[in-house]
Image (cartoon, helix red, strand yellow):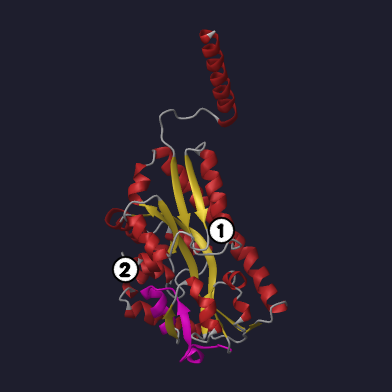
Amino acid sequence: MKSLKHFSMMVAVFMVLFFAIAFYGAPAFGQPKYTLKFNHVLGQKEPYHQGFTNWAKAVEEKTKGGLKIEVFHSAQLGVEEDIIEQIRAGANIGQNTDSARMGNYVPGIAIMNGPYFAENLAEVEKLTKSPTVKGFLDELANKHGLKVLSFSWVQGYRHFFTNKPIRSPEDLKGLRIRTPPAPIWQESVRALGATPVALAFGEMYPALQQKAMDGVELVYNNIPAGRFYEVLKYVTESRHIMLVNYEVISAKWFNSLPADYQKIIVEECEKAGIETSKLILEKLEKEVKADLTTKRGMIVVDNVDIAAFKKAGEKAYEVLKIADVKDKVFKEIGKK
């Protein structure tokens, strides 16, 4: 009886394995499974969150469950700067960030979040081939433990959102404008005429409500997600920064992955980034703008002096002593 029972159990196990292989594909026996906890500060309704979810799904499918990405919105795992330090220590955590914060480790890379640096998706694509930019990414990985999977995630154009019409840098004089806590952001806003105030994303609404700040500089899609239309009235379409984001994980953890997993996580991150960026720039920005102006009472300022803003923005590169780096990269990608 025991032999018969043992045989029946073996048949049952075999049948389970047979159907699992038929449905999912043959597993890599003995190969460990990996989990990446990916953090971002944006809300669950933001297009980036759906983009990260799509990336996670594609990676799990292509690795047959061997590599799973768990996406956490609204800074559920913690603030960006703390997460980045955990990444450097080798934790299996990822973060949506930007070259401004990466500039704290490799100063030159901050140019990519400077005023009027990249102005369209074609220029962002060219940057992936820049020898100087590639050198920055290698330095981030090899010296600071920060592996950039992709920077093809473009969140849109940053504009000024205030309670008074802004048409030139002179109009920003004396206004306290929120910036993320990184030198290139602060110097960019200062160069463009305002007084920068470093605040975490989640602290902006109460600061505006209490009039501790006079405005923000954000992309259109941030406004409805944060309900900033309740405390701000005017939009100045300065397009002063094309918000290029970086998807960063631990270089040590990345190197521990099987080679095929490394290839999949990078390729699918790049693919999801390009798709999300096109969706935002070609469709969602227009839809959000229409909603804010027709239903939320916001007003788009006319006659904005973009030439004056571009000229003023050059000072940020000079103050941070990265103007020569900007010029070098511009030469590499054929931009004047």
In-front residue for pair 14/57: 14
| Other-residue count near label 1 (Cα within 10 Å), few / some / many at <14 / 14–19 / ≥20 | many
Seen in the picture, residue 191 relative to 125 is either above or below; the reply is below
Q: How many labels does the image show?
A: 2
| Other-residue count near label 2 (Cα within 10 Å), few / some / many at <14 / 14–19 / ≥20 | some
What is the residue that sits farthest to the left in this orientation?
Answer: 143
Expressed as whole percent of the image width and height from the top left, the position of residue 121 reads 52, 63
For disc 2, the marked residue is 107
Asked where in the image residue 260 lies, by quadrant, the reply is: top left
Q: In the rendered structure, which amino acid carries the disc numbered 1?
A: His
Which residue is at 34% across, 75% downward?
323
Asked where in the image residue 50 lies, by quadrant, the reply is: bottom right
Seen in the picture, residue 199 relative to 29 is either above or below; the reply is below
Specify the segment rendered in magenta: 165-190
Expressed as whole percent of the image width and height from the top left, the position of residue 137 reads 35, 57
Apparent side of residue 16 relative to residue 103 in the rendered image (left or right): right
In-front residue for pair 19/324: 19
Helix, strand or loop at label 1? It is: helix
In-front residue for pair 215/311: 215
Tell me, yes or no, whether the highlighted magenta stretch contains residue 296.
no
In-front residue for pair 323/285: 285
Apparent side of residue 116 relative to residue 227 in the rendered image (left or right): left
Q: Quarter of the image containing the C terminus?
A: bottom left
Tell me, yes or no, whether the highlighted magenta stretch contains residue 174.
yes
Nearer to us of marks 2 and 1 is: 1
Expressed as whole percent of the image width and height from the top left, the position of residue 285 reads 62, 68
Which residue is at 51% across, 10% downward?
2
What is the residue that sits farthest to the front in this orientation?
Answer: 1
| Residue 302 at least partly seen | yes
For disc 1, the marked residue is 49
